[in-house]
Amino acid sequence: NEQNFHIFYYLHDGLMSSDRKAEYHLRPDTAYRYITEYTNKAPDISSISVNRVKFKTIEHCFEIIGFKKEEVSSVYAILVAILQTGNVEFTAKDSGYGGEACVVANQELISIVSELLGLDYVDLLDSLTTTGMVAKGEVIIRDNSVQEAEDARDAMAKALYGRLFSWIVNRISSLLRPGHVTGQNEQFFTIGLLDIFGFENFKTNSFEQLCINIANEQIQYYFNQHIFAWELVRCLDLVLKHCP
């Protein structure tokens, strides 16, 4: 019953309550697989109201920081494209060579996603249903099975979100940096933000959960050392230096 990233809920409810939902092809009668709360149960009215307020806050933050309207629209388009991508379904077909192949069952979503991302329809379709391999300098295209296509779909969604997140962080840093080059005697302050991994423990855990939890342990160890152990050593050092 875990939720996905909060921005998807804010975006969904925020755009659904505006006249921009048609621009992003959002429909009130559609349940999006990547936002499980809306797939598994009817959304709570109070939660929708909170999400809409949060969405307005995010829009205000974009404006205050200095994002252009075109940039914000692109951010929304990519996020909605991720939601739409999660609903792409595949059905098996005979490849004609005795192997597995698949086709997209709801190709209208491919059209929507390609429009939102500014991609060619055929290129996007082929990237999900086929895999290209290079052997002896020759590119070989083979069909994906349903499972392989679903994995490619989810991998694409994760990659889109990861790259969008990195771009937003870099853009914020660019917009908030000092407007002039500081001299040797000048100082400016920075704020560093660290998004620490949360521990994951599902009924069925994979290598991904192992990597996340190991990384979390290492970050927690560094934090404890820096905040407690190193500071304690520093305090003891100061006491020894200043005590008669």
Image: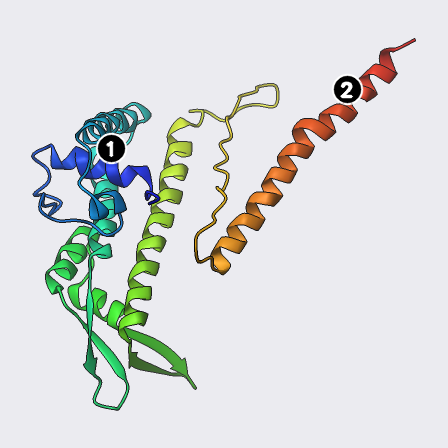
- What kind of element bears circle 2? helix
Query: What residue is at 22 percent from the left and 37 percent from the top?
Result: 11
Q: Residue at x 21, y 53 (%)?
A: 117
| Position of residue 5 measured from the top left corner of the image (x, y, whole percent) | 33, 41
Residue that carries the numbered disc 1 in the rendered image? 68
Q: Position of residue 161 (x, y in %)?
A: 33, 48
Residue 26 lies, with reference to residue 58, above or below; the image says: below
Q: Is residue 28 left or right of residue 77?
A: left
Checking the image for residue 87, the label placed there is none
Label 1 neighbourhood size at 10 Å, few (<14), some (14-19), many (20+)?
few
Query: In this picture, is 121 found above or below 79?
Result: below
Q: Which of marks 2 and 1 precedes in the sequence?
A: 1
> In the rendered structure, which amino acid carries the disc numbered 2?
Cys
Q: Foreground residue, 10 or 156?
A: 10
Closest to the observer, 130 or 174: 130
The disc labelled 1 sits on which kind of residue? Lys
Q: Residue 23 placed where, x, y %?
A: 10, 43
- What colour scheme was applied to this rendering of the protein? rainbow
Q: Which residue is mark 2?
A: 235
